[in-house]
Amino acid sequence: MSQEPDSVLVESAVNGDGDSFTELCRRYYAAMVAIAHSIIGDKHLAEDAAQLAFAKAAVKLPQLRKKDGFAGWIAAISRNAARNMLRTTKRVHCIEDSPAAAESGEDASSDAVRKALGKLAASAKEVIYLRFYDGMSYEQISAVLGISEQAINGRLRRAKRKLAEQLKREGFGEVRI
């Protein structure tokens, strides 16, 4: 079943095949966590947001018009779930406020990178998280975000350049990207 295109899995899931929806979840869960993490800034809350997104998708799956557009559709639901969760909790997880960061003994460079990431535009942060935190290929990111691989390459180059500039301002000298 894992070789089936998304459109076939979506159609099967709409017709009551739970295994098909499970396969869709397996394919895209890590990417949805990365997308939510780029918005919320907390891995555990991002996992909650991704799970919420899949729960909403399970209910609304029959409404999906373009059966081959599942990846982009679930990405939009994940973004909205993460934004809603952020609004509901009424707190932005800053690295200084994160007990997990303090307990893990993160060094100054990790702290500086997280702060610099927090200053990126949402679209740039999203591709950084998908590529480097989730390890997705350009082709996979393209499928999830619905943009070309060239656009992904451009976003990544600009994001890395901005990260390097921010880290230089923080006193880390020249940073190779």
Image (tube, rainbow, N blue to C red):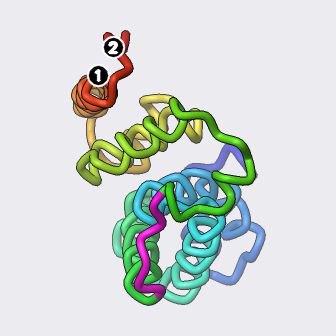
Q: Is residue 140 above or below residue 48?
A: above
Residue 173: numbered disc: 2
Residue at point 24%, 25% (across, down): 165
Q: CA distance from mark 1 to mark 2?
A: 5 Å
Residue linked to disc 1 = 168
> In which quadrant is the C terminus drawn?
top left
CB under 8 Å between callouts 1 and 2?
yes
> Which secondary structure dominates the residues rendered in magenta?
loop
Relative depth, front residue between 158 and 91 = 91
Residue at point 35%, 66% (across, down): 66
Relative depth, front residue between 51 and 177 = 177
* Amino acid at the residue labelled 2: Gly
Relative depth, front residue between 30 and 113 = 113
Q: Which residues are magenta?
A: 89-94
* Amino acid at the residue labelled 1: Lys
**Element under label 1?**
helix
Residue at point 38%, 84% (across, down): 87
Q: Is residue 3 above or below residue 177?
A: below
Q: Is disc 1 surrounded by few (<14), some (14 to 19) or many (20+) residues within 10 Å?
A: few
Q: Is residue 153 above or below residue 10?
A: above
Provide residue 97's location: percent of width, then percent of height: 53, 64
Residue 54: numbered disc: none
Residue at point 70%, 66% (across, down): 20
Provide residue 40's location: percent of width, then percent of height: 46, 65
